[in-house]
Image: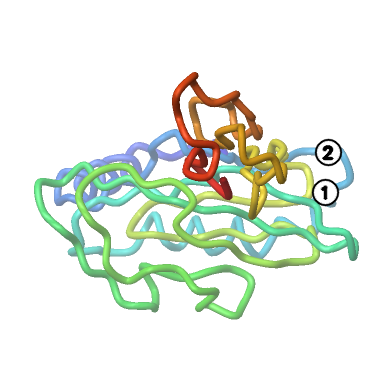
Amino acid sequence: MRRMLCSSTFTAALMLMAAGCGGLAEQPGAAPEGDGVARTEMSEIEAAISQQNMSHCDKPNLIPLLDCVEKLPDGKYKAHFGYKNDNNKKVDVDIGKFNRFVPNPENRGQPEEFKKGTYHEVFTVRFDGKPISWLLTKNSVIASKTSPACGPPPPMCPPSCDDGNPCTADECDASTMSKCVHTPVMDGMSCGTATSGNGG
């Protein structure tokens, strides 16, 4: 979301950035436009982000990330969030002004401890598809029903790959692309002990 700032406001924002909280950074998951998201649905979020940018923050800079939004069978949505901490240390930010969601409730299961590095799929938030924003230190990210959709879940091995044949080695793992593979046992190997891998 882009704003025009007067010179004095811009200077103040730069001072806050220098203090460590960031702000004015290009954020992933920018404010959605069109495609079923009403302007009125964004007004509370925009006001909160604007106020946040002008507030003093003494926390090291953290960046909230939106990984994707999943549409659920009941018509609701689930937003998948992560974060980025480029500081050389762990950062703690309690739920409150600099770690909250808009609209309320402020606490939607987000972490309060942020380890150094970039982390995806840290927590999820179930919502109705209308825009919600996670404000973290001086940065924010917005999720809505128009956000990038989550892809299909990764393939998983079934609970068992046992084909009932004692003369095959049954296997399923990353090397088989999560598919059951039944390999005939080698000559001279007892069929009674020829199972291996998942569910053999």
Circle 2 SS class: loop
Quarter of the rendering containing residue 154: top right
The amino acid sitting under disc 2 is: Gly
> For this rendering, which residue is in front, 48 or 125?
125
Q: What residue is at 19 percent from the left and 46 percent from the top?
A: 15
Q: Nearer the viewer, residue 140 or 2?
A: 140
Mark 1 near mark 2, Cβ–Cβ under 8 Å? yes
Local secondary structure at mark 1 = loop
Asked if 155 appears above or below 16 in the picture, the reply is: above
Residue 134 % position (x, y): 51, 60
User: Which residue corresponds to the image point at 34% horizontal and 37% vertical from the top-left?
Assistant: 7
Location of residue 155 in the rendering, given as x and y in whole percent from the top left corner? 65, 38
| Residue linked to disc 1 | 37
Considering only vertical position in the picture, is 54 above or below 8? below
Q: Residue at x 66, y 46 (%)?
A: 162
Location of mark 2 (residue)? 34
- Relative to 155, is 95 on the left or the right? left
Q: Is residue 191 above or below residue 21?
A: above
26 left or right, relative to 114: right
